[in-house]
């Protein structure tokens, strides 16, 4: 798009979807459209997901982004955000990541919740949020910003559905009552070499705080989290690039190990 483009929620959604389908990264939208504020950015995100749903995808849950200090520091954005997960993003365990479908994928370990009942904010505490959780899993999220070099401001990354691309859920299902998620430890490895470590406390002090944050932020936008939805609570560590032939794995103390290979 040229500088003469008349920017709107609709054109911004088109630009981001085009970047995704053509696997062509671009500069931040706010560079061309300084008027893109946070609230409008969430409108762009909603429009983008509505178009994916219209094209046949189904919403399967939500993701939080930038809930850990490691992520906030790396991305230069110090505020958490919410975004959407669709079935097209879900990668079954054991299926390799096809990097030719993506721009510059990176992988991050996450603690994942599946909700047993709906959660309707605002006003939700972490304890209330935890009561709605049926199961806890280890996860790996593949992020793939549509912005060159993952350089963006908060409204840019919100509009881009928080760099969403793929996610893998581990095979071990745990009940929340069995776990102390602040102390749940994670070791991140690339091709067998340890590259990072964290505990669940990295995510807003406790991943349940992240879930409450999502319920409250979405509740203010009139969205209720539904029973059965998957919630990615946010990268525990900085994300690592994954290239063809590489294997990334996250080993947790009680949630098992989840591995993703790339081709
Ligand atoms: C934005 C997405 C952040 C997380 O878990 O923090 C995210 C990005 O880092 O490109 O998914
Ligand atoms: Mg993430």
Image (tube, rainbow, N blue to C red):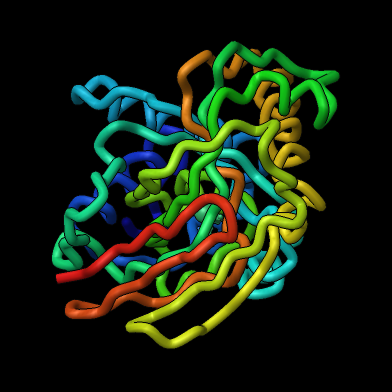
Looking at the picture, tell me which residue is in the foreground, 174 or 163.
Answer: 174
Residue 221 figure quarter? top right
Q: Is residue 157 visible?
A: no
Is residue 92 placed above or below 228 in the rendered structure? below
Looking at the picture, tell me which residue is in the foreground, 4 or 103.
Answer: 103
- 61 vs 117, left or right, is left
At 24% from the left and 62% from the top, the residue drawn is: 102
- 170 vs 244, left or right, is right
Q: Is residue 178 visible?
A: yes
Residue 37 figure quarter? top right
At 57% from the left and 79% from the top, the residue drawn is: 196
Query: Where, quadrant-wise, is the C terminus in this rendering?
Result: bottom left
Is residue 242 placed above or below 36 in the rendered structure? below
Q: Position of residue 18 (x, y in %)?
A: 25, 49
Q: Position of residue 125 (x, y in %)?
A: 84, 26
- 247 vs 42, left or right, is left
């Amino acid at each position: 798009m040229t500088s003469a483009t008349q920017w709107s929620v609709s054109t911004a959604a088109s630009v981001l979807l085009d970047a995704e389908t053509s696997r062509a990264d671009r500069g931040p939208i706010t560079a061309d459209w300084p008027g893109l504020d946070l609230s409008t950015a969430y409108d762009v995100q909603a429009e983008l997901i509505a178009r994916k749903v219209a094209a046949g995808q189904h919403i399967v849950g939500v993701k939080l982004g930038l809930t850990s200090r490691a992520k906030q520091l790396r991305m230069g954005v110090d505020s958490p955000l919410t975004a959407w997960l669709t079935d097209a993003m879900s990668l079954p365990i054991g299926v390799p990541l096809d990097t030719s479908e993506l721009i510059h994928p990176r992988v991050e370990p996450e603690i994942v919740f599946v909700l047993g009942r709906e959660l309707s904010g605002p006003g939700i505490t972490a304890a209330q949020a935890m009561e709605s959780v049926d199961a806890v899993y280890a996860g790996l999220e593949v992020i793939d910003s549509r912005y060159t070099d993952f350089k963006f401001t908060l409204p840019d990354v919100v509009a881009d559905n928080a760099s969403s691309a793929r996610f893998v859920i581990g095979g071990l299902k745990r009940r929340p009552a069995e776990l102390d998620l602040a102390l749940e430890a994670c070791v991140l490895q690339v091709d067998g070499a340890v590259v990072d470590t964290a505990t669940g406390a990295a995510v807003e002090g406790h991943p349940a705080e992240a879930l409450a944050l999502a319920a409250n932020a979405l509740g203010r936008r009139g969205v209720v989290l539904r029973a059965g939805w998957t919630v990615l609570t946010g990268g525990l560590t900085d994300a690592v690039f994954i290239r063809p032939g590489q294997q990334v794995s996250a080993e947790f103390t009680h949630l098992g190990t989840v591995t993703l290979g790339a081709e």
